[in-house]
Amino acid sequence: MATRMREGTLLEAKKAKLKPPPLFKVILLNDDYTPMEFVVIVLQRFFAMT
């Protein structure tokens, strides 16, 4: 649908183009406080890594 503005200007409405969201970038830091078992559980549960 077009919209009329002052002095005869005609503007056309544009449809928004949708695209899938980008994938997340995940960084795991190696520290001395997080147990290895927890890291393995997180990788298996949230990223389907076995």
Image (cartoon, rainbow, N blue to C red):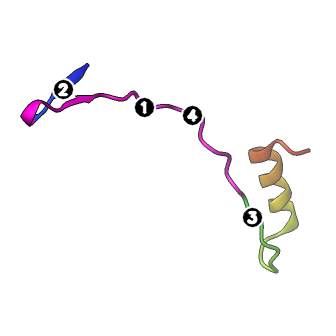
Marker disc for residue 27: 3
Q: Kindly state the secondary structure of the residue where label 2 is placed.
A: strand
Q: Nearer the viewer, residue 32 or 10?
A: 10
N-terminal of the pair, mark 3 or mark 1, is 1
Quick one: 1 or 34, which is closer to the camera? 1
Main SS of residues in magenta: loop
Separation (CA) of disc 4 from disc 3: 25 Å
Residue at x-position 87% and y-position 45%: 49
Cα distance between the residues tagged 3 and 1: 32 Å
In the image, what residue type sits under mark 3?
Answer: Ile
Q: Which amino acid does label 1 sit on?
A: Ala
The spot of residue 4 in percent (x, y) is: 14, 27
Nearest the eye: 15 or 23: 15
Q: Name the residue under label 4.
A: 19
| Secondary-structure class at tag 4 | loop
Magenta residue span: 6-25
Residue, disc 2:
3
